[in-house]
Amino acid sequence: MNNELLSSLMPLVVLFAIFYFLIIRPQQKQQKEHKAMLEALDKGDKIVTNGGLIVEITKVEETFLTVKNVDGTTLRVARNYIASKWEDA
């Protein structure tokens, strides 16, 4: 009885382990790296917004960033809408 229960649950355990290591763990790692990147942003950094704009940070606030566009326009962007930090090649 005990061996039958173990052998019937083993495929589910293996499937969960595969799911965890291929999907859940990498996504958690990516979220942690993105959060660290957002916290490390500072004045003068260039960022890419989710809309695809590349802008320069002029002021850092708790939930918003004041940024300057290429034409000098000043915008406020919520931290939630920052895709990545722009690294000039």
Image (tube, grey):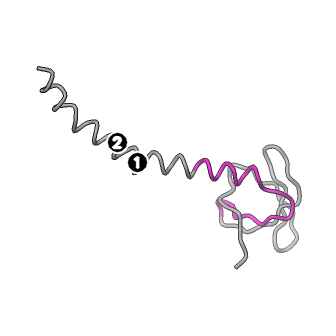
Local crowd size for mark 1, using a 10 Å CA cut-off: few (<14), some (14–19), many (≥20): few
* Vertical position of residue 30 compared to residue 8: above or below: below
Does 43 appear in magenta? yes
The stretch in magenta equals: 31-51
Dividing the image into 4 quarters, which one contains the N terminus? Answer: top left
Residue at 70 percent of width and 64 percent of height: 48
Residue 23 x/y as whole percent:
42, 49
Residue at 82 percent of width and 43 percent of height: 62
Question: Alpha carbon of mark 1 to alpha carbon of mark 2: how far?
Answer: 6 Å
* 46 relative position to 12: left or right: right
Residue 5 x/y as whole percent:
17, 25
The residue type indicated by label 2 comes to Ala
Secondary structure of the residue carrying tag 2 is: helix
Q: Name the residue under label 1.
A: 21
Dividing the image into 4 quarters, which one contains the C terminus? Answer: bottom right
Residue 17's tag is 2
* 36 relative position to 16: left or right: right
What is the count of numbered marks? 2
Local crowd size for mark 2, using a 10 Å CA cut-off: few (<14), some (14–19), many (≥20): few
Which residue sits furthest bottom?
89
Q: Do the residues labelled 1 and 2 touch (CB within 8 Å)?
A: yes
The residue type indicated by label 1 comes to Phe
Residue at 74 percent of width and 64 percent of height: 47
* Vertical position of residue 89 compared to residue 50: above or below: below
